[in-house]
Image (tube, rainbow, N blue to C red):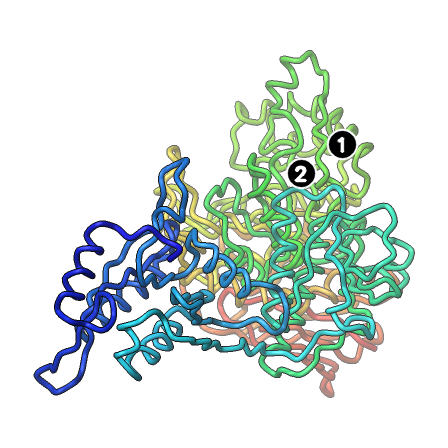
């Protein structure tokens, strides 16, 4: 025997021999239900690091055998340091899972050999032991197989194990994956850039595991060598000429003579490309068969260095969100219709990597609160600027950085220096300053008037982008005074300086005087901003901040990370704006004016009324209700367009109004963008077009000849 028999077992076997049993340690008897059972001592040995599934399976095996009158003890294979495993063996062992016995070690290794012939479980014997090994999810099936061997003939347990070899071969869902016409079996590695961190490499292991689970071929992850002649999946190789041959792209999958190139504009778009490859495989699995990747797969997108005003930006202010650790949270932002996130860069590199790769996947660009030192630190350092060199600066997930929120006028000179250093170091990225609204006081602005505050900002910084925030919705269905004045002052400054105009709109109550907007109120603010020429609408706030200084009610996402009804309202508004966005951004703002100003509420009034829009004449409105009009001309060509907004406070739920617009100067029709739809209108016999506006609703109209 290969084991030393413990003393108590020796006594038991001796007693059984004296009783006349034919085999050591056994006897036969008749049970109450006339089943012949065997009383014997078996030892079920499990590993000291068994999973819960293995532990549960071992307990079930022991208990079931005991029901048949078979005495079984369950032990763990733990052995003191320096002791020999063979000196701690038991008679009639059933080796369960990954134990320290050589027999079970070999059996478990055979399960994970990376070949298509792998098995889900195996039950075997070597003449002295039974050996059970199973992959996760198959332990119960292995236990059932061993019990079937025992219960087929219980007398087998009265002797050393009979010969048994029961196994279930794993059925992989796919026959094969071929890349560039070659089976993935021929691929040696998944090779990655030398700059990848450990958490980036973990992402590649997901691909390796998926390929294995799909077709039974293990392609290991390896760092890229300078020269490699075999077949490999190359991730982040940066073969720019080969990849970019297809035009502007965020990522590309390119089959080539040496394998597959998985390439993005940057490291996080590499991940977006990797995710696209993973998706290709996952989508093919249910159908089985062979997945062939033989043609390039590209996601064509705007290049990173696009002008800021090349798209209508819808931004979600998430800011400090340390609990944004799940891909679903980023997916929900895109699902809500946003294409930009305003957030703080996490200090934890792994968390930032996850945020950035998810942003790349869902094509979300970031306005980050991170690039510069605080102004106080800047001044404390004697105006010595210390740039933060992060690899993310050249990424598509970086749209720009906020240098300062609501500065006073004494800060403008320092901000000018910081802005110019940023612009020189990071061309194509936006150094961003957000100004006070016009209800800030002179002490906050450090100048006497709001007009002076805005003019001095543009004169000093000559910025490439400008933003301010205004939150007009007060409790009691009240709108702040001078709301349109504020929009006009900022819009005029942006227009005269040829600077894109951005504005934060209100989506939440953050003080006792402010109400939380409903869907029509968010729509109304957005269309008011569009009428004044805004190309970037920033929602304050998407998530509900945990603030100790302000009393925030639930925003679009509450403090438990759950969607509120405002999330669904913002989604509807964003979808409407996105449907007109590509057309809207082709036009340049000319100015705003009011219709039926004599009937307008106080917040509507502003002095700078535009009077030069000659494409339309008389505008007739139901009951002479007031309208806000914004005029536009094409950036290229001679086209004209306008935005029209029902200015009634949407919180009052006023009735719909009918608007009739007289076309002039050769315009005979229009393309109307309303409620997410594109509608072609032809002027009637009087040369007019008409449309209906609900309370708080707006439309964008392109005029046609």
Label 2 CA crowd tier, 10 Å (few <14, some 14–19, many 20+):
many
Question: Would residue 258 appear left or right of 401 to someone viewing this image?
Answer: right
Using the rendered image of the protein, determine whether residue 340 is visible from the camera's viewpoint: yes
Upstream in the sequence, badge 2 or badge 1?
2
Q: Seen in the image, is 360 located left or right of residue 25?
A: right
| Residue at mark 2 | 401
Q: Quadrant of the C terminus?
A: bottom right
Q: Residue at x 25, y 71 (%)?
A: 23
* 316 vs 113, nearest the viewer: 113
* Mark identifier at residue 422: 1
Residue most extreme to the left: 32
Dot 1: within a 10 Å radius of its alpha carbon, few (fewer than 14), some, or many (20 or more) residues?
A: many
> Picture coordinates of residue 642 (x, y %)?
71, 65
- Kindly indicate the quadrant of the structure image that contains residue 496: top right
Residue 695: x %, y % from top left: 49, 67
Q: Is residue 602 visible?
A: no
Q: How many numbered dots are placed on residues in this image?
A: 2
User: Would residue 384 appear left or right of 475 to someone viewing this image?
Assistant: right
Query: On the rendered structure, is 622 left or right of 643?
Result: left
Do the residues under discs 2 and 1 have CB atoms within 8 angstroms?
yes
- Residue 404 in the image: state x and y as whole percent: 62, 31
Q: Quadrant of the N terminus?
A: bottom left
Q: Is residue 435 placed above or below 665 in the rendered structure?
A: above
Q: Give how far apart the Cα atoms at labels 2 and 1 are.
A: 9 Å
Instruction: For mark 1, give the secondary structure.
Output: helix
Residue, x 28% and y 68% (percent of image)? 61
Q: Secondary structure at mark 2?
A: strand
Q: Position of residue 622 (x, y in %)?
A: 53, 74
Q: Nearer the viewer, residue 263 or 374?
A: 263
In this rendered view, identify the residue nearer to me: 537 or 263: 263
Residue at 63% of width from left, 13% of height from top? 380
């Amino acid at each position: 025997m290969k084991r030393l028999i413990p003393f108590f077992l020796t006594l038991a076997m001796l007693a059984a021999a004296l009783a006349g049993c034919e085999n050591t340690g056994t006897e036969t008897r008749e049970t109450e239900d006339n089943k012949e059972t065997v009383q014997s001592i078996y030892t079920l040995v499990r590993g000291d690091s068994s999973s819960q599934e293995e532990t549960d399976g071992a307990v079930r095996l022991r208990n079931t055998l005991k029901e048949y009158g078979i005495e079984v003890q369950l032990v763990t294979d733990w052995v003191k340091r320096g002791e020999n495993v063979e000196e701690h063996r038991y008679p009639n062992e059933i080796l369960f899972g990954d134990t320290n016995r050589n027999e079970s070690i070999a059996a478990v290794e055979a399960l994970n050999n990376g070949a298509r012939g792998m098995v889900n479980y195996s039950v075997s014997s070597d003449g002295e032991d039974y050996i059970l090994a199973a992959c996760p999810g198959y332990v119960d099936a292995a236990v059932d197989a061993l019990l079937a061997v025992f219960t087929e003939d219980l007398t087998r347990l009265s002797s050393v194990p009979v010969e048994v070899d029961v196994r279930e071969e794993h059925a992989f869902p796919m026959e094969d994956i071929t890349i560039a016409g070659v089976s993935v079996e021929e691929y040696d590695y998944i090779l990655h850039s030398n700059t990848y961190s450990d958490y980036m490499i973990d992402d590649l292991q997901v691909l390796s595991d998926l390929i294995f689970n799909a077709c039974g071929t293990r392609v290991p992850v390896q760092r890229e060598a300078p020269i490699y002649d075999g077949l490999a999946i190359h991730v982040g190789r940066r073969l720019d000429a080969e990849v970019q041959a297809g035009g502007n792209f965020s990522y590309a999958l390119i089959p080539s003579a040496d394998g597959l190139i998985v390439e993005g504009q940057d490291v996080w778009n590499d991940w977006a490309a990797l995710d696209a490859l993973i998706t290709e495989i996952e989508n093919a699995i249910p159908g089985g068969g062979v997945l062939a990747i033989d043609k390039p797969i590209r996601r064509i997108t705007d290049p990173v260095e696009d002008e800021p005003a090349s798209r209508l930006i819808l931004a979600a202010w998430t800011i400090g969100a340390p609990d944004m650790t799940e891909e679903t949270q980023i997916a929900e932002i895109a699902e809500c219709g946003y294409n930009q996130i305003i957030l703080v860069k996490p200090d934890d590199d792994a968390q930032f990597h996850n945020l950035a790769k998810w942003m790349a996947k869902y094509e979300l660009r970031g306005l980050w609160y991170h690039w510069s030192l605080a102004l106080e630190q800047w001044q404390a350092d004697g105006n010595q600027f210390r740039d933060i060199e992060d690899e993310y600066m050249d990424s598509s997930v970086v749209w720009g950085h906020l240098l300062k929120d609501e500065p006073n006028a004494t800060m403008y000179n320092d901000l000018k220096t910081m802005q110019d250093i940023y612009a020189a170091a990071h061309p194509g990225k936006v150094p961003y300053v957000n100004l006070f609204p016009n209800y800030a006081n002179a002490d906050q602005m450090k100048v006497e008037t709001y007009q002076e505050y805005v003019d001095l900002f543009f004169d000093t910084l000559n910025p490439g982008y400008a933003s301010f925030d205004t939150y007009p919705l007060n409790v009691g269905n009240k709108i702040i005074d001078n709301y349109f004045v504020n929009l006009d002052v900022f819009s005029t400054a942006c227009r005269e300086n040829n600077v894109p105009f951005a504005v934060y709109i209100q989506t939440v109550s953050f003080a006792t005087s402010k109400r939380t907007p409903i869907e029509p109120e968010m729509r109304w603010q957005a269309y008011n901003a569009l009428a004044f020429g805004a190309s970037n609408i920033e929602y304050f706030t998407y998530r509900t901040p945990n603030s100790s200084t302000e009393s925030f009610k639930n925003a679009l996402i509450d403090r438990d990370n759950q969607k509120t009804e405002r999330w669904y309202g913002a989604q509807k508004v964003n979808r409407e704006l996105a449907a007109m966005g590509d057309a809207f951004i082709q036009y340049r703002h000319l100015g705003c004016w009011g219709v039926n100003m004599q009937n307008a509420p106080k917040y509507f009034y502003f002095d700078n009324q535009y009077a030069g829009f000659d494409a339309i004449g008389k505008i007739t409105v139901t009951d002479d209700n007031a309208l806000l009009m914004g005029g536009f001309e094409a950036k290229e060509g001679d086209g004209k367009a306008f935005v029209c907004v029902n200015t009634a406070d949407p919180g009052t739920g006023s009735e719909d109004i009918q608007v009739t617009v007289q076309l002039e100067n050769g315009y005979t029709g229009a393309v109307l963008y309303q409620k997410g739809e594109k509608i072609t209108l032809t002027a009637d016999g009087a040369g007019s077009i008409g449309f209906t506006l609900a309370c708080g609703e707006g439309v964008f109209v392109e005029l046609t000849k």
